[in-house]
Amino acid sequence: MQRQRRGDVMTDLVNRRSLTSIFFKTLGISLFIYLFLGFMVLPCLNTLTSIFRETNAAGEPDPFAVIRFFFAGNMKNYVLNSLKLAVILVVTVNVVGVSIVLLTEYFDIKGAKILRLGYMTTLIYSGVALVTGYQFLYDDDGILTTRLLELFPNMNPNWFTGFNAVLFTMTFACTSNHALFLRNAIRNIDYNTVEAARNMGARPFKVLFRVVFPTLTPTMFSLTVMTFVTGLCAMSAPTLLGYDSINPEIVRLAGSSSADESFPQARAALLSIILAMFTIILLSILSAYERKGHYLSVSKTKARLQKQKITNPVANVLAHIYAYVLFVIYMIPVVMIILFSFQPYTSIRMKNIDFKNWTLLNFFGSADYQYMTSRGTYKTRKGSISGLFSNEATLAGIKISFIMSVAAAALACVIVVIVCNYIFKNRNKKTSTVLEYCLLFPWLLPTILICYSYRVFFNNETIWYVGNLNLYYAERVRFLIILAYTVVRLPFSLRMIKAAFYAIDEELEDAARNLGASGLRTFLQVKLPIILPSVLAVFALNFNYLFTEYDMSATFASSYATSYAMVIQSMTREEGLYGYNVNASGRRCASTVFIMIVSGIILYLVYGVGGRDLGERLAIRDKRRKRWQKIKARFQREPVQSTT
Amino acid sequence: MIRINNIVVKFGDFTALNKINVHVKEGEFFTFLGPSGCGKTTTLRTITGFIEPTEGTIEVKGRDITHVPIEDRNIGIVFQNYALFPTMTVYDNIAFGLRVKKLNRKDIDLKVREIARKVELSDDQLKRAVSELSGGQQQRVAIARALVLEPSIICMDEPLSNLDAKLRVQLRNELKKMQKDFGITTIYVTHDQEEALTLSDRIAVFNKGVIEQIGTPNEVYNYSRTEFVCNFIGDINRLCEDIVRQMAVKGAQVDPGKHNYIRLERVHVNTPPTEEDLVLDARVDSREYYGIYIKYYLDLGCQTIKVIERNDGVNIYEPGQMVKVVINPRDIMAYPANAAAEER
């Protein structure tokens, strides 16, 4: 009887638990469907269908009007221009990218450590900061162009515009992935294979082409596809350097109205869809290639790669020259920007470094500016010279970018952690596969398409599931941008955090359950601490990407959400007009330095501090404690010594 | 203590366990032994609650726990790779279950230090990260973590399999001593027959989801009930029909139609035979030197037979040398020649 009652109590408990579990499961699934359909599928679907919703002059539906327009007008030129950039970029980026990796990791080049630092500078500044940095040096009144004009007066001062400028800038900006991934791939090569080839009589360059390169092919292929997509979706460089490609045109059309030109919205949608099609095709090729599998080393004991000496003296000298020329190209913008960020506006205007006159005014504080009016009188504009952290517009940009980036980076991490936890627990179920693909969905779409779709779709008061609120209106656009940022960062976050989840030993969960822990407790106390370094790393990398992003905020183009990158971009145009913003260039340099510092700190935290396990952290804590005790003991001992 | 009644576990169409019946006595060291995929870990996970059986019941001290949630079963587990929480110190690992039970801090500290002392973990080691400990120390932490909750049973899933051979032997002895000291009922899973024989009070030999034999180490080794058990436990020679026929001719109670086996140590070389012994001429084919003993491969004409001889430093036979092999028919274990046995 007693046993029966105990059994009944147990069954009740189990039933209650399963009811709670069903409730939360249903709630989770409903919320996910709402978010996925409402904020991923419907806006993009609206963009796709808008192409076919146009009417002709008589007001009759004409579903193929935009497509006819595409082939009749110059719209296809934007697509061809983007394709041209993407194709040539693949060649130039691979040449430079492979060169920098070989020069620092494979060949014995003197000063390789310094060279590596130089080549990796693009990791800490990219996007608008990098493009404006290049402009600071090379545009019509840039430092280098000014110097070159002094030497060659007949030279075209506008040489750094259009396709060549975009290609040059993006070539060096896009080698970051090579510096990270190709470097890792080359470091993983088993040196015994190189030695074996040498032993069989192969010369160093034969070894390079027949043994080393084939093992790098999978990484190279992935990098090539990613570079192609980057070239196709390029935004900040073409916008700032003046090159007609798809993305700047989409942004332009998005801000245009049918009063100015024929069906701008539908044209923007068509261009977005074309971009999406290219992206989907390329990513499918990449994914099919990745499924084929990579070369796996079969060595039981892998030997560390040793640097190869270039035995031919001429080739050796040429390799050194090439390495250092690349180093100079990478380093000049960085060095110049750092130096000029501490220079007064007069030196920046004159493009001369005044070694006796350094200032922090580009970063902090403000000063008045006196200028001569057309009447020949002097006028003073108060606070016209202002530092990065004193200028209202810049500070507002930093603030809004910071808030939006932190919110979106955190939101993406939270969503992905919850989803990954579900996927991890239900790894063999179809629902987890569906869930995973849903989160990877934004990866197939160019960011511009997502942002453009949001801007158009939510810019009305008829969307019932957001409470009939116009989300593009006034300050609400910030919420919309946060959503777009989050959606765009979901695939990356998923790939990284999922890998961290799968590194968790399954038995840990069983152990925690066996010790009586609930699902929530197991997640919070066992799984989360294990994946936390990865989650924080993803959060930091998301933040780093979003804090200085330009493409998305430019697509939204709202004065209520002027991002930091947009402020930096505007600094290139507003300098010195009527005595306003006198030191805009100086502030631009300071901004780039600030971005470098922020990115540098984030990378250090992610890869330096974040990589430590509990043992290492405890050892450091122990070391600090001992050092502190030593210092304390010294202070306590000293008075005793003095009395004796 | 533990009674497993007619347990069936199915994964889709695949039957992982088919009508398993086991009775483990209080304080017993009971081992599930068998090759990979035979169902021993599935049985253990069914007992601990990670797998719900398709049919059958599990009782602990007369209480049916078949559908009781894992956390309410009061069964401790030591996992194959110990499953120590890497982000926690040794202390926090051991204290985890006590904190879940919401014990006060003082009691937790008391219990953790007490169990740590019993498994010989120092105060300094308690403060360290688990990754800083050796394999043996990690095993002790895993045992302490399981025992601190005072479970009625402790289950161990191949806890020695990830260690090197020397450490395995050392920890095996420690494990046995600890089990005797705590007097706790232990279910141990292993595929290592030597481990099973040295540690266990009783052994259940698993094969393809069923139990082939339950018995003491001596029973399963010397009186293997099935051909699978006899083959799986220890090294063995299957005698060719010719030799068995010669024994039958001599009047021994053997059946050449069956599969006849003899353990290596039951075959003798150059020893004076008794009346019922069969003596055969053999040539030493090769030998393996193990220090304490020597294993010989002897060519009997119809087959090569393995023999182990104590290394006395005097009677060491060289390859090619002719010797006399002595076999007592009573040492033979015979099994019906069925299809399953042929397959093996």
Image: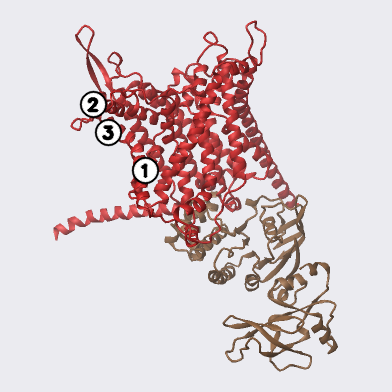
Chain colours: A red, B brown
Residue A644 image position (x, y, % from top left): 14, 61
To which residue does mark 1 refer? Answer: A322
Q: Nearer the viewer, residue B27 or B186?
A: B186
Residue B315 image position (x, y, % from top left): 61, 91
The quadrant where residue A53 appears: top right
Tag 3: residue type? Answer: Leu
| Residue A468 horizontal side relative to residue A606, left or right | right
Marks 2 and 3 on same chain: yes
Marks 2 and 1 on same chain: yes
**Inter-mark Cα distance, 2 to 3:** 11 Å
Name the chain under label 2: A
Element under disc 1? helix
What residue is shown at x 47% (from left), y 35% (from top)?
A: A542
Image quarter (top left, top right, bottom left or bottom right) of the C terminus of chain B: bottom right
What residue is shown at x 43% (from left), y 57% (from top)?
A: B127
Element under disc 2? helix
Q: Residues within 10 Å of mark 1 (few under 14, many from 20)?
A: some
Residue B23 image position (x, y, % from top left): 73, 65
Tag 2: residue type? Answer: Ser
To which residue does mark 3 refer? Answer: A339
What residue is shown at x 75% (from left), y 65% (from top)?
A: B211
Q: Is residue B238 above or below residue A106?
A: below
The tag earlier along the polypeptide, 2 or 1, is: 1
Q: Is residue A638 above or below residue A129?
A: below
